[in-house]
Image (cartoon, rainbow, N blue to C red):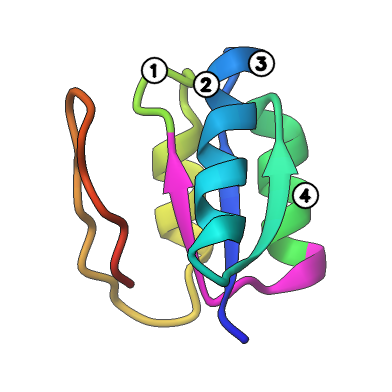
């Protein structure tokens, strides 16, 4: 099963995102702030992640520590289907 790390600081959005990912069959690790998300990436080594772009300074940290170059998708708005 593919593991997704979801990092989002808005509790309602995080809950909805995690519910939708689980419904689609993904194993989900949820983090409600950047430091927790960063720690979870290092400890749990998820297959992929979805990150709120507004979590200050987090994206650069995550990219720096990624094990290999990544293709990063940025999604704005709603109504998308997540496909890793």
SS assignment at label 4: helix
Spatial CA distance of label 3 from label 1 is: 14 Å
Q: Is residue 39 above or below residue 35?
A: below
User: What residue does disc 2 label?
Assistant: 13
Spatial CA distance of label 2 from label 1 is: 13 Å
User: What residue does disc 1 label?
Assistant: 54
Picture quarter with the N terminus = bottom right
- Residue 11, by quadrant, is top right
Q: Is residue 15 above or below residue 45?
A: above
> Crowding at label 3, few (<14), some or many (≥20) Cα neighbours within 10 Å?
few
Q: Earlier in the sequence, mark 4 or mark 3?
A: 3
Q: Are the residues tagged 4 and 3 within 8 Å (C-beta)?
A: no
Q: Are the residues tagged 2 and 3 within 8 Å (C-beta)?
A: yes
SS assignment at label 2: helix
Numbered mark located on residue 35 in the image: none
Spatial CA distance of label 4 from label 3 is: 19 Å
Position of 54 with respect to 47 (left or right) is: left
User: What residue does disc 4 label?
Assistant: 39
Residue interval drawn in magenta: 43-51
User: What residue does disc 3 label?
Assistant: 11
Identify the residue at the far front of this view: 23
Q: Earlier in the sequence, mark 3 or mark 1?
A: 3
Residue 80 versus residue 6: which sits nearer the camera? 80
């Amino acid at each position: 099963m593919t593991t997704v790390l979801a990092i989002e600081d808005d509790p309602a959005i995080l809950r909805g995102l995690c519910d939708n990912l689980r419904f689609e069959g993904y194993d989900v690790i949820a983090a409600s702030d950047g430091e927790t998300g960063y720690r979870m990436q290092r400890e749990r080594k998820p297959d992929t992640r979805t990150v709120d772009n507004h979590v200050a300074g987090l994206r650069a940290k995550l990219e720096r520590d990624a094990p290999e170059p990544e293709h990063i998708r940025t999604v704005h708005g709603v109504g998308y289907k997540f496909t890793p």
